[in-house]
Image (cartoon, grey):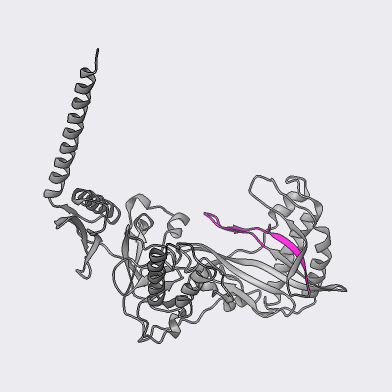
Amino acid sequence: MPVKIDFDRFRFEKAVYAGPSDEWEKRSRVGRSGVSRDACDFMSIGNDIVRELQRVGWDVPFVDVEIDHYGSGKNVIRACRQVSFPVEYPDGERTVTIRYGLKSGQKGGYNLCGSAGSYTMTKSGEYEAEFKGALYDDGSGDWTADKWSPVLPEMWHVLKQLKALPDKPGHDVLHVEGDLNLRQLCQSEPKPVHENMPEKLYVWIKADDLYHAYNDPYLHREGDYAAEKDYVLAGTDYRMVPDMRLGDYMVPYAAWRGGNYASEVNAPVKRGLEFSAEYDGLPVEIALKDLNDVYVYDYADYRRGRAEASLQAEETGEKDWKPGEFEAIKMKAMVTFVEAADYKGGFEEPVYMIARQLHKDEARAMKGPIHARVVEGGAETVMQDEVTGEEILLHEVHPDSFYGPVGHMQQAVREANRAGRITGAEVKIDPEIPAAIKAWHARLDEEEKNETETNDDEALRTLP
């Protein structure tokens, strides 16, 4: 059965392999954790299964193996996340699944906790859980364990099968990223950028999530903390769609998992189909080197479908979705969803979903002098990029906004100061803006004073 590699957002990151640890199993056997003997055997055999899989080259015909990646920045852990194998019984086939817990942090590490279950397939193809055991390690020694006995013989059987297999060359060629065979399994060929992809893309990220990208001195740390913040774009945000299925259509895993949403225009873009753009964010300029884990979809038909539905709701007063109606509109975008490497161009409103971590060789947090200036209807805030000279609008006056002119001025000042604090750039505020805000507050104070005096006069007139 082929080995499944889940890179998460870390396809091209150097990942430290974390092998099984017997720490908790040994502690449990001497009575320090209150874990049953069956649970100890489960941990011990489960660890040995992973060790044997490494010895025989991971890819064996009777065990499904999943390798996972976990972490942040350049502090990434690689480990065996799950193994499963079928067991034949007179009444049908059962699948035993062992899941392994991952730990990462300043030291990084790995221990087997996880859960195991045995499931019987019904005639309809569904699975009925026969039993399920769970083992939790929260660091306090408060473990739970039950029903381990039925699964242990099946685990012993698979371990015996693995031990009968010969060594695969490379299993003992060890490296911090794992043995030679595992490293080869985790290699990915870069997918080159082609002519149908724009040279530059722009992602708007919540400003508070970009301190590390601007080398903010407050966040300067050493060791693993610094490594965990060593990236510009995280590669994760809202899901494109929160549904795993739209009617009979199975949503691609990448679309359900989501990423960062980019466009060719340097302005906030909708994050997926159901979530608003990051209007309080700051821009990141993207120049992709490879198209792995990058996807494209056309937003145009979905946008029109939502607008038509909204208009219909206003005209008819029916504001609730009919069964399948919203799913059909989502499908307008979903059917266009393709890997960027396969994108042929021609989308009316392409949105680019980036689902991997980007560093400074592919992403740049834009910065430069910031200016809050008076315009018709209030004030706006702009930033002039220090590299391209482009003027980027951070706050603008909207005709349908509930803010009045002074309200827009206050927002412009807040946005300018916030962006300056995060980017470390110079901030300029037109003197007319604080003067107008001060005059507005003075007028409010005067109105409140007059209202208080009026109320006092009324109270005096009503005295006996």
Residue drawn at the location 64% of the way across and 64% of the way down: 19
Extreme right residue here? 90
Location of the C terminus by quadrant is top left
Q: Is residue 413 or residue 22 the one in the foreground?
A: 413
The verdict on residue 119 being magenta is: yes
Q: Is residue 300 or residue 412 the one in the foreground?
A: 300
Q: Is residue 10 visible?
A: no
Q: Is residue 320 or residue 199 the one in the foreground?
A: 320
In this picture, is 324 found above or below 109?
below
Residue drawn at the location 35% of the way across and 80% of the way down: 348
Extreme top residue here? 464
- Residue 176, image x, y percentages: 56, 67
Q: Is residue 356 visible?
A: yes
In this picture, is 438 found above or below 269?
above
Location of the N terminus by quadrant is bottom right
- Residue 96, image x, y percentages: 75, 68
Q: Tag count in the figure?
A: 0
Determine the image quadrant of residue 251: bottom right
Q: Is residue 268 or residue 86 the one in the foreground?
A: 268
- Residue 225, image x, y percentages: 45, 55
- Residue 452, image x, y percentages: 21, 27
- Magenta range is 100-122
In this picture, is 64 found above or below 396?
below
The verdict on residue 226 being magenta is: no
